[in-house]
Structures are given as structure tokens and as C-alpha cells.
Amino acid sequence: MAAALVMVGPAITAKAKENNGSADDGFDVGRYIVDLNYRPDSDTLAGAATILGRATRRLPRFDLRFMLTVSSVVVNNEPATFSTRNGRLTITPKRPIEHEGELLVEVRYSDTPGTYPGGVEHGAGWKRTANGALAVFSSAWWYPTAFDVADKATMDLKVVVPTGLTVVSNGTLRSGGPVPVPGGDQWTWRNEVPRPNSTALLAIGRYDLKTSTVLGGKQLVTAYGTDLGPPDAPARASVERTPEIVTALSKWFGPYPFAALGGLVDKEFGTAVATATRPIYSGGFFDDGVNASVVAHEMAHQWYGNAVYPTPNEQWLSEGFATYAEFLWSEREGQGTAAELAQSAYDLYPAGHAAWKQAPANPDPDNALSFPIYERGALALQALRTRVGDDTFFRILRTWAAEQKSDKAATTAGFTAHAERVAGSGLDDVFRPWIHGTERPAVGPNGRLGKVRTMTKPKSFDTIGDNSDRFAAGRH
């Protein structure tokens, strides 16, 4: 595991700002229906979005997160007045929406997304590419959404692009592929399981895309940029193992939470992000060869990060869990056990080292390190496993994922209470030093009697560490 302490503060800060506490939601979205037409030569995006929801209180007006120029808004079949400013679309319906009243919002728009601040290299935004565009963790650049990033909804998406281009998004691909229409080809994607709006993916370009049916009827979609070069073969050798990896993760974490799976590898993307159902990977993750560990990490986020969506300043609830998935996958592959990896990471930094000064449950958003969120979060889980035993530990993980059905973001306090309830005892002796402490825990993750020593570091140690450093540097 690399000894470098990589800064991840900007990513946390950006996610925290997304909550924008001054925004006025007041409704729960159930479904998005989005129709787009994209012209890559001019970077012009025209769209019509329909939002179905229900008011959670009386709404004389409400806000949506959106960057682009709007031409009209209709609410419950009546024209509404609206204004846009700094990524906020404020809508005043002709008649106030009463508490628990149904909400049908139709927004029409046209603009050039690439002219707005951001860009996926900055963590969120729109990136115009040589053949099309990428929008990752940045729905506001292509369709209006609720401000609450934890608000989960289903989605239907249709995108018309020039013939020869491919559209990759979340969920299942309908009609087996593109359908010829006036102006090019129409690609249709459907999300049948609600997902947080922040986990959206839109990729338009030249990809080698294939579909199949796996795991008892789930659709597998994988896509690879046609310009990947040398990383192409190891990328395919890694991402095509996604069904095998999901099968293993399901044994540890419970049933896979979505109706589709797969992955997208794009040369022009700089990191890896677990967009719902279908993570996107930079080709750079495969520069040194096969890297199934990164696939295990990103697919673990389908449980912990997408189904279990944490508050912005408690990302260890997703990153620590996903890094621990890499530990478990390593153990399955005979590359080093979870206990050996955890001990090696614990031994890497002595007491008093700066790595221990950041508590996973409360990292400094402007000066955080990769270790507290990724590796130390995983070490905390190993310490919990040591404390309660395998049967109880995996029952805690499986039931934690299964119980996250609401639109409420997950918290450390919630996980602590859940773990103690399942274990039937207090676990302050684990969570206080490992999650809240600002010093190196006096007892390692394998307990006083369970310290694991090996003559050499586990084979997967450097790969997992390099993955964490890449994630952090790329604002994963």
C-alpha cells in the first residue's frame, strides 16, 4: 500500500456544497423521464425532462438543480413562471402544490453544456471529448434534478445522437441497441431501481459496447473506448469479470441492489466513479495490467455509496467499505488475506504520524488525506470483524445495506447503532478509536492476540494502495 498521503479534500468539499442547504426542495421525486438530442459538432444539447413527484409540504414555489437555459416550464399541466441563477431553477406554479399533492413538472431547454463552469476533471460537470461528451456525477449539466443528492428516483432516458456514436448511461439498454430516427440514432436506457441523482452517467462517443444476460436475468453492459490503446486488453480482462465479482460481493453484502451491471472504460476520463449500475473507469487503471481490484472497489459502491448513500462528510461509509471489498477480493484470489492487508496498513504508519490525525467520521474537508477515508475506514471494519466474529460481522453488513430504503443519507451514528443492535452489545471500544479517534489505535485491527505478521507484504498490497491514491487524486 503506497505510503503517499494523497489529498482528497476538494472532492469532499464539492460534495458538501452540492447539498446547498439554502435550496428549497419540498418534494420527493419518484421518476425522471428525459429526452435529449445532442449534436457533438456544436456541443448543443436540447432536452425535455418530465419529473414525477410528491410535495412533502405546501409548495408556493420550489427549486431544481440545473445549469442550462430553460425555454418553458409546465407544472401539473399549467404553465409556470421560472427563473434561473447559479445552477438553480426556481419554479412558481400557477397554483401552490398542497402537502402530499402530486407534482408533474415538464422542463424544456437547449444550451451548450461545455460552456458552464466545471468539467469532469474538476469532479463534476460536462466534458466535451473528441467524439462526443462525458457527464459524470453531474446531472445538473444535462437534466434538472432535486437539490437533495440522496433523493432516489427511477429514470427513463432517450438520447438522439449522430449515427455511429454510442450513448452509455445507467440501467438497462432497451431495444438491444440504437434505433434509427430522424437526425441519427436513438439510444434508450431505463433505471428500474431508484438511485441517487448524483450517481448519473452520460457518455457519448465511440465505444465497443456489448450486452448479455447474467446472474439470473440481469443485464450486463460493458463498453470500451475504441481509442484505449495498450490498456484495452487488461481493461477487458478486468471489467469482464464484473459478474463474478458481483457474485462474490453478494455473499458478503447481500443481494445486488440493481437490475443491471457492467462498466465503461474511457481514455479521456481521469479516475473511476461508481455511477449507478455501471462504473466508469479511466484507462489508466489498467496501464500496468489486469486490475480486478478496482472493479471490486467500484462494484462494492453499488451497495455502499449508491444503495447506502452517506452524508458528504462521512465518505468512509462508502470508501472504507469499498476498500474493504478489495481486501475481501484479495483474500478470495489468494493475494493476501483481509487480516494481513489490514495489519500491513496499520504497521505502515507509526504512532504520531500525520496519517492518524484525521478521524474518518470527521475529516477536514479542506485538508483530508486518502488514508483516513479509504484504508483506515477498511481497518475499522477489520477491527469490527475481529471484535464480533465473522457471522455477526457479515450479518451487520448485509442488513445495513438491505435496510437503506429511504431517501435519507446514511450516517456514522446510524451505522454504529445498527452494528450494536445486530451484535447485541455496545461497540464503543471499536468505533471510538478507529472512527472518531485522532491518534493511532493502541491495539491493531486484528486485536491483541491476533496480530498477523508476514515476512513479505501481501501481493495485492501495492495495487490496493495505488488504487486508493488514484481515487483520491482524481476526486473519486
Image (tube, rainbow, N blue to C red):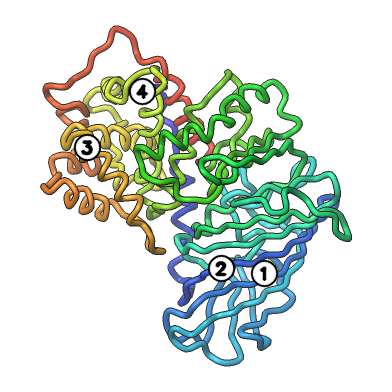
Q: Is residue 266 above or below residue 151?
A: above
Judging depth in this view, the residue of 393 and 90 nearest the camera is 393
The amino acid type found where label 4 is placed reads Glu
Q: Distance between the residues labelled 3 and 4?
A: 17 Å
Q: Residue furthest right?
A: 182
Q: Is residue 133 visible?
A: no
The amino acid type found where label 2 is placed reads Arg
Q: Is residue 195 visible?
A: yes
Q: Distance between the residues labelled 1 and 3?
A: 46 Å
Closer to the eye: label 1 or 3: 3
Q: Name the residue under label 1.
A: 49
Dot label at residue 391: 3
Query: Secondary structure under badge 1?
Result: strand
Q: Mark 2 points at which residue?
A: 31
Q: In this view, does 333 lie to the left or right of 448?
A: right
Q: Distance between the residues labelled 1 and 4?
A: 46 Å
Circles 1 and 4: CB distance less than 8 Å?
A: no
Residue 343 position by quadrant: top left
Q: Residue furthest bottom?
A: 95
Q: Is residue 240 above or below residue 166?
A: above
